[in-house]
């Protein structure tokens, strides 16, 4: 049975990913930061058995090491999905310096450094195991920027570059690395924003992506994508931002 560690599991995208993978027979370790009740509720409703929850502040390197050792203590981790992320608003011309510093520390600490540190442990363990898969959740913001959250865009651009570096470093060990880059996704947290006519006007499909659609792409990367796709960044933004 495949054992997968999913960060940010209680959120809309994380829960959709966990649900899809559990239905495909995976055993999951579900990381959460503060929403213990949400993580436990998700664990209880997942198909299959043996799923566990684990609290971790992904901005704390020591906590990340504890998370990994706990997740891998009884069963090797076959795949890691770095889904957790934060998005504090800090528009450059309307944010005090103290708040600016806090936004950058928090955003890079979780979105980039936290993901990278967890990848460090996954990479070494998977190389020793003879293979594994890592999927990092990025964003179209890495390519187009974010007007009110520049640290978020920077963190995701850094995550893209880091993931591709990791793909090069680990390919010979059969550890594959993929990036999934959504645009807006219809989760509860952003329900009001994605209903904004200005947001919808930017969507050629007339709607934003659903968590289930993002989960489908993540599931493909974890379970089906061929080895030659390692290092790929897959866009899931409904043609709202195109690049070549």
Image: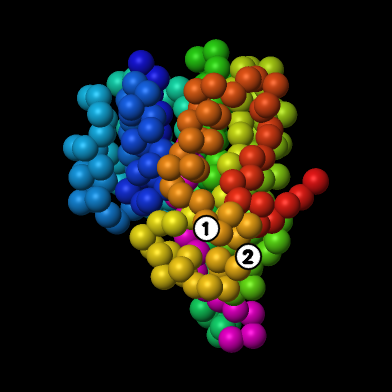
How crowded pointer 1 is (Cα within 10 Å; few <14, some 14-19, many 20+) is rated as some
**SS at mark 1 in the image:** loop
Out of 123 and 38, give the one closest to the viewer.
38
Label whose residue precedes the other's in the sequence (2 or 1): 2
Report if residue 87 lies within the magenta region.
yes
The residue lying at 51 percent from left, 51 percent from top is: 209
Side of 44 where 111 appears, left or right? right
- In terms of image quadrants, where is residue 4? top left
Report if residue 126 lies within the magenta region.
no
Residue 122 visible in the current orientation: no
Q: Spatial distance from mark 2 to mark 1, Cα to Cα?
A: 9 Å
Please name the residue that numbered disc 2 is placed on: 202
Please provide the residue range marked out in magenta: 81-94
Question: Residue 121 placed where, x, y %?
Answer: 50, 32
Out of 205 and 56, give the one closest to the viewer.
205
Residue 141 visible in the current orientation: yes
Out of 60 and 194, give the one closest to the viewer.
194
Please name the residue that numbered disc 1 is placed on: 207
Q: Main secondary structure of the magenta part?
A: loop
């Amino acid at each position: 049975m495949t054992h997968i560690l999913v960060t940010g599991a209680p959120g809309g995208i994380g829960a959709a990913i966990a649900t899809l993978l559990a239905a495909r027979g995976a055993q999951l370790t579900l990381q959460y930061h503060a929403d213990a009740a949400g993580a436990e509720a998700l664990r209880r409703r997942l198909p299959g058995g043996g799923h566990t929850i684990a609290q971790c502040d992904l901005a704390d390197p020591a906590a990340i090491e504890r998370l990994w050792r706990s997740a891998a203590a009884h069963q090797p981790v076959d795949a890691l999905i770095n889904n957790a992320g934060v998005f504090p608003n800090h528009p450059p011309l309307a944010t005090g310096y103290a708040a600016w510093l806090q936004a950058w520390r928090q955003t890079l600490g979780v979105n980039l450094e936290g993901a990278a540190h967890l990848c460090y442990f996954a990479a070494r363990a998977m190389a020793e195991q003879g293979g594994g898969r890592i999927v990092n959740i990025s964003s179209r913001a890495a390519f187009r920027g974010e007007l009110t959250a520049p640290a978020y865009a920077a963190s995701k651009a850094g995550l893209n570059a880091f993931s591709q570096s990791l793909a090069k470093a680990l390919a010979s060990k059969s550890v594959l690395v993929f990036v999934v880059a959504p645009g807006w996704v219809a989760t509860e947290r952003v329900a009001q924003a994605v209903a904004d006519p200005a947001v919808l006007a930017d969507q050629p499909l007339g709607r934003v992506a659903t968590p289930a659609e993002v989960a489908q792409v993540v599931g493909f990367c974890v379970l089906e994508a061929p080895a030659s796709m390692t290092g790929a960044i897959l866009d899931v933004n409904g043609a709202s931002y195109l690049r070549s």
